[in-house]
Amino acid sequence: MFLFVNFPSWIHPEIFPGVPVLGLLRWYGLMYIFAFGTAYAILKKTMKEGMLNTKDFTCTEDDLFSFISTGIIFLLIGARVFSTIVYDTSGIYRTKPWLIFWPFNQYGQFTGLAGMSYHGGFIGGWLGMIFWCIWKKKRVFQWVDAMVCAIPLGYTFGRIGNFMNGELFGRITTAPWGMVFPGAERFSSNLPWVKEFAESIGMTLNSPIANLPRHPSQLYEAFLEGIVLFAVIWSVRKFKKWDGMLSSIYMGGYGLVRFIIEYFREPDADLGYRIAMDSSAPIYKNTNLLNFSTGQILCFLMIVGAIILAVSTKIYYGRSGKAVASSAAR
């Protein structure tokens, strides 16, 4: 009995692999379109519910489109810049910064903007929304709270795109849903632990190197950080007590869930652990809970930020006597 799953052979990063011109279209880019479209549809729903209205202002679709467009532009810039600063170890972007937004590789092949950081997108998106609210003289956390109702479900498509690319997979696992990803690191079939591991899952080692099953961590994230977090925020949106409450739930909820999932997701090989109690521990196994990846450090900061945001916005709106901005429109 096989206790693992092979990555579907029919899935390719390109939507039309091998087809001239159409071969440039990639699932990851299409997932971004689905993500932004889904986010806009949900944000429009919150507008119809009155979350973006006040006594003196009624939100229109033009306001909505302007708001989300600004956020998306800042998000993409932040995601790309943060990725090249934090996750790149080659140093090429510091010497050739114009390559940050150059969509071709060194061989002239179109790759798109390969390499985007969630945390960079998070920072960029927030800055974009804050910029728009200040520009349009709107209450920042009234609008950001509406936006965080829409972000998680849109985010789901991004992680599905990672899965379609066969990237950001997890550590090796004996779980029956473990998946063999084509691009994963191989191990010598002669190693005793590899033989034992393969035997435990019914895998036959027919070659000198073995590709062992991994946690499909992209799907874990799509479900927990996307669908589940969306369900939580969507279910409590009508019970919102102050502006900033939903934003705090999103920051803390995402940070906590992602922090846990990082124990199943393999860190980038060139970065490894940023904080390691056991520096000899391999990245393809979780052998020490006190070894922390870059993602975990950033998620910890998100959790701390969520607590600070919740307390500060609660105190501010409580002391100022300002109720939830959209209450009059409900």
Image (cartoon, grey):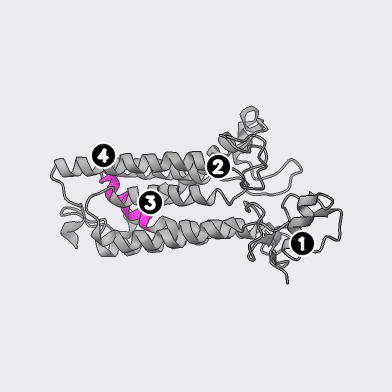
Residue type, label 3: Tyr
Nearer the observer, 155 or 175: 175
Dot placed on the residue nearer the N-terminal end, 2 or 1? 2
Say what amino acid the circle numbered 2 marks: Arg
Amino acid type assigned to the residue bearing label 1 in the image: Glu
**Residue 102: within the magenta?**
no
Distance from label 3 to label 4 (Cα)? 16 Å
Residue assigned mark 1: 199
Does dot 2 land on a helix, a strand or a loop? helix
Q: Can see residue 29?
A: no
Mark 1 residue crowding within 10 angstroms, few (<14) / some (14–19) / many (20+) = few
Give me the residue at 52% from left, 56% from top: 221
Mark identifier at residue 312:
4
Residue 164 marker: none
On the image, which quarter does residue 146 sit in? Answer: bottom left
Residue at 48% x, 45% y is 121
Q: Nearer the viewer, mark 2 or mark 1?
A: 1
Q: Residue at x 67, y 61 (%)?
A: 179
Residue 259 locus on image (x, y percent) = 49, 47
Q: Earlier in the sequence, mark 3 or mark 2?
A: 2
Q: Which residue is mark 2?
A: 80
Q: Main secondary structure of the magenta part?
A: helix
- CA gap, disc 2 to disc 1? 42 Å
